[in-house]
Amino acid sequence: MGTYKYLLIYIALFEIIYSIVDMIISPILFSHDSIYMVIVNVKTNMLSGEVLLILDAVYCGCYGSFMGLFALNFIYRYFVASGSKYLATFNNSKFFLWLSIPLIYGIIWGMICYFLISPTSQIDNVMRNEVMLNFGWEMEDITYIGPYCYQKQQNETYIIDLNSIIALILMSTIIISSISALIFFGVRCYLKINQLFKGVILMHTPCSCIFIFTLLDLDLGTLSGISTLTVALFPALDPLPTMFLIENYRNVIINCFSEPVKKLRTSSELKMIAT
């Protein structure tokens, strides 16, 4: 396992943080025209709206961190599989530089969300009826993060919101860099290609599609909620290949289940002998 065990622990910590934040804020993803929102209900939560907005940004930042974690995971696997001289950088002080990649991705993503696409009066006005129709909530009951790319005016003209466009471009750049690393290094580690596709399907594809639909001013409505499900599934499914493909982990899991069965069987046999 070598340094890889520390990398797995690092990934697990991010997934735990993500899951805890997800549990606290219970976000809902919703799309309408060129608006894409990560909604948090303030009324049903004990925390204040400002704190929930920060946690919403942290939640989104965790998604950005996953982009870096995917890339880092497959870079390491490629170095191991190819016997690259750069593998040594994971065994010295440079290892912390590698670990900083997902952290930087997450910080950038979270700051983009908090400073560029936090709640605005324009989105409140446009989404008031949609939020009430789909969820039965007033805009004052929620906080959210999301871009509003093309702001429709009363005279049927549009104003392009530069903050939203810049945010989507920066986020798309992060996603593209992650996918590029996955393809470049993942194909070279073709024995792990199944996990590569799992990561792309669960994490990259839904968000990328929503970004595209948002930029094209196409309404996904409640269908955008599918990305909530796929992203939430990832922390649960991600450890499974490691747990069952690596012999040491697999043996521990088998023993955890086999030992109670053996004890139960032994206990039953003793009872039968006694009777």
Image: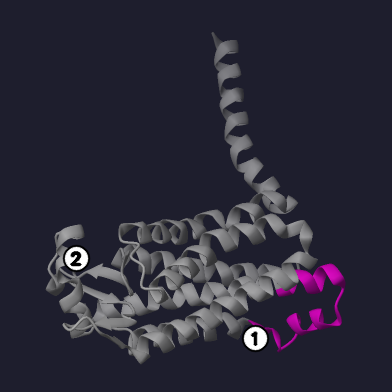
Q: What residue is at 49 percent from the left and 66 percent from the top?
A: 15
In the rendered image, residue 46, in percent from the top left (x then y), is placed at 18, 69
Is residue 6 visible in the rendered structure shown here?
A: no
Q: Quadrant of residue 127?
A: bottom left
Which residue type does callout 2 highlight?
Val
Q: Which residue is mark 2?
A: 131
Spatial CA distance of label 2 from label 1 is 44 Å
Which residue type does callout 1 highlight?
Phe
Instruction: Name the image quarter holding the N terminus.
Output: bottom right
How many neighbours does mark 2 have within 10 angstroms: few (below 14), some (14-19), or many (20 or more)? some
Under circle 2, the secondary element is helix
Instruction: Name the image quarter holding the C terminus.
Output: top right
Q: Nearer the viewer, mark 2 or mark 1?
A: 2
Which numbered tag is attached to residue 66?
A: none
209 with respect to 198 (left or right): left
Q: Quadrant of residue 268?
A: top right
In the rendered image, residue 232, in percent from the top left (x then y), is placed at 43, 59
Relative height, residue 47 to residue 85 (above, below) = above
Under circle 1, the secondary element is helix
Tell which of 163 and 10 is nearer to you: 163
In the rendered image, residue 246, in percent from the top left (x then y), is placed at 72, 54
Q: Which residue is mark 1?
A: 96
Residue 87 in the magenta stretch? The answer is yes
Q: What residue is at 59 percent from the left and 85 percent from the top?
A: 100
Per the rendered image, the range of residues in magenta is: 75-98
Is residue 267 visible in the rendered structure shown here?
A: yes
Magenta stretch: dominant SS? helix
Tell which of 91 and 33 is nearer to you: 33
Residue 1 in the magenta stretch? The answer is no
87 with respect to 100 (left or right): right
The answer to which of marks 2 and 1 sits earlier in the sequence is 1
